[in-house]
């Protein structure tokens, strides 16, 4: 997610200023793709009509049998969708990068407040660190999800620390690459999906036992004329 141009009082924080002017997009003369709530046959058809090269879809592929998600987490999310209570929130504080990040609220994961609070602050992978020069001209690296003391010592601001999540460890745990600490602590997964969970519910109506990536593509293109 790119952050909103001017945050408004909605769950996502996005407003009218974030709406795309497709005519101006086409005038640029470069190819473009649409993303966000585009995982339906009609939305794909509309994207082509608007001049897009295609769409970006994440959730249906992430929940497919071909994805790298551990099966137990995929099944937990699908089960929640079957019951109509798959919850995904747009969290404006979770990512140490400052960009909005969509978090699945599922027991036993970092999206569960109690699990998040129980995790010791730690940044030992560093894929999202920021670099800067300290007062001596030496390069330093910071992450707002790292322990407070070193972050502040390296010039980080205290207000940047609140409610940050370690995306690196959490996302790797979701695909079975979670670290286990010497003291026995195991990294909990952080799960992310798109906010439009009705797409998952619709897919389950025709594929109640799950689906593969090919079936997702076939469904998305089902409303597009063959010669489009």
Image (cartoon, grey):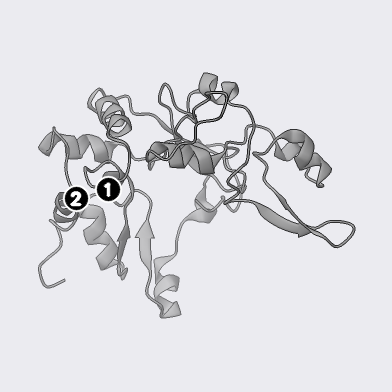
Residue 4's place in the image compared with 13, above or below, is below
Residue 92's place in the image compared with 51, above or below, is above
Instruction: Identify the residue under disc 2.
Output: 216
How far separated are the C-alphas under marks 1 and 2?
7 Å
Sequence-wise, which precedes: disc 1 or disc 2?
1
Circle 2 sits in a helix, a strand or a loop, which is it? helix
Residue 200 is labelled as none
- Please say if the residues under marks 1 and 2 sit with CB atoms less than 8 Å apart: yes
* Residue in view at x 58 percent, y 21 percent: 118
Which residue occupies the foreground of this view, 220 or 163?
A: 163
Left or right: residue 56 versus residue 94 is left
Instruction: Identify the residue under disc 1.
Output: 61
The percent position of residue 145, horizontal first and vertical second, equals: 64, 39
Q: Please identify the quarter of the rendering in which residue 29 is found.
A: bottom left
* Residue in view at x 17 percent, y 37 percent: 210
In this view, the residue farthest toward the right is 136
Q: Quadrant of the C terminus?
A: bottom left
């Amino acid at each position: 997610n790119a952050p909103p141009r001017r945050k408004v009082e909605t769950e996502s924080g996005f407003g009218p200023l974030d709406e795309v002017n497709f005519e101006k997009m086409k005038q640029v003369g470069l190819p473009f793709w649409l993303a966000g709530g585009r995982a339906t046959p009609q939305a794909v058809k509309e994207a082509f009509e608007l001049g897009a090269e295609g769409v970006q879809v994440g959730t249906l592929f992430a929940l497919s049998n071909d994805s790298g998600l551990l099966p137990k987490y995929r099944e937990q999310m699908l089960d929640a969708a079957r019951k109509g209570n798959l919850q995904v929130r747009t969290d404006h504080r979770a990512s140490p990068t400052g960009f909005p990040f969509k978090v699945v609220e599922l027991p036993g994961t970092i999206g569960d407040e109690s699990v998040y609070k129980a995790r010791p602050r730690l940044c030992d992978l560093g894929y999202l660190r920021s670099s800067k020069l300290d007062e001596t001209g030496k390069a330093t690296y910071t992450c707002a999800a790292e322990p407070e003391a070193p972050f502040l010592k390296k010039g980080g601001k205290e207000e940047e620390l609140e409610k940050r999540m370690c995306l690196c460890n959490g996302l790797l745990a979701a695909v079975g690459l979670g670290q286990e600490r010497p003291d026995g602590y195991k990294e909990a997964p952080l799960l992310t999906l798109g906010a439009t969970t009705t797409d998952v519910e619709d897919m389950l109506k025709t594929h109640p036992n799950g689906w593969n990536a090919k079936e997702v593509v076939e469904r998305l293109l089902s409303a597009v004329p063959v010669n489009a």
